[in-house]
Amino acid sequence: MINLLPSDLKQEYLYGRRNSSLRRWATAMLLGLVGACLVTFSGLFYMQRSIDTYANQVAAAEESLKEKKLSETKKEADEITKNLKLAIDVLSKEILFSELLKQIGTVTPANTTLTDLSISEVSGAIELTASAVDYTSATQLQVNLEDPANRIFSKADIQGITCTANVTTGVSSDYPCTMRIRALFASDNPFLFINQKAARP
């Protein structure tokens, strides 16, 4: 078949077919791009919702754990802090207990015996418990401990004295009186290791 159409018209038909094909391709690419964007944004939205959900669950779990464990944890932390302070204080003073006990034994009056000694605070003081045959002997121990000439304690306070009559208890005891004394170390106490080091030339 011979095409007798003019050359210009044939060119227009050719470009028209090409333009139609290009429009179809452009439309298909545009629709594909829109679809890809929709899928991408949907995925991002879903991921963000999942992240927010998990974050809320974690926050709720942490808050619940804090409420349950706060008081218990605080109590344990306070106890650890107290014990740590006591240990640091004892180590920093480095009390020579063997020598200290000898000196306390030296100043302990007759008819009195030391039954217990403990550090209960971090203020440089100790608690002593003693037994005595009578009230006078018990108070004499406090006087001896506080005597500056002994260079043990700068102050010794009686926390309490209890004398139990044998008749009341029905139990025989050579030391019916029990006393508690809280004593504060003297600054020049020779039985503290820090003073021993300071005294060296």
Image (cartoon, rainbow, N blue to C red):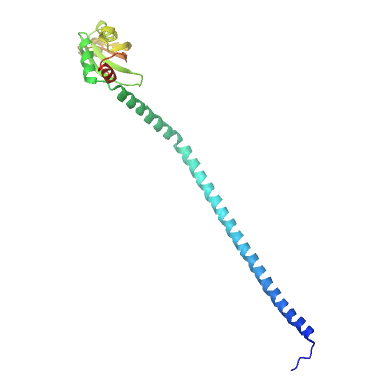
| Residue farthest toward the bottom in the current orientation of the protein | 1
Instruction: Give coordinates of residue 18: x percent, y percent.
Output: 71, 79
Q: Position of residue 146 (x, y in %)?
A: 29, 9
- In the picture, measured across the screen, residue 102 lies left or right of residue 127, that is left
**Is 149 situated above or below 123?**
above
Residue 86 vs residue 200: left or right? right
60 lies above or below 84: below
Q: Residue 142, how many percent across, how many down? A: 28, 9
Q: Is residue 42 visible?
A: yes
- Indicate the quadrant containing the C terminus: top left, top right, bottom left or bottom right: top left
The residue positioned 40% from the left and 29% from the top of the image is: 78
Rendered view: 25 above or below 179: below
Q: Is residue 147 visible?
A: no
**Vertical placement of residue 40 versus 53, above or below:** below
Quarter residue 174 falls in: top left
The residue lying toward the viewer, choosing from 33 and 128, is 33
Q: Residue at x 58, y 57 (%)?
A: 44
Q: Is residue 76 left or right of residue 164?
A: right
Tell whether 61 sits left or right of 116.
right
Camera-nearest residue between 133 and 71 = 71
Question: Which quadrant does the N terminus fall into?
Answer: bottom right
Query: Nearest the camera: 182 or 97?
Result: 97
How many badges with numbers are in the image? 0
Which of the 4 image quarters holds residue 86?
top left
Q: Residue furthest top?
A: 136
Work out whether residue 195 or residue 164 is closer to the camera in this orientation and state it.
195
The residue lying at 21 percent from left, 13 percent from top is 105
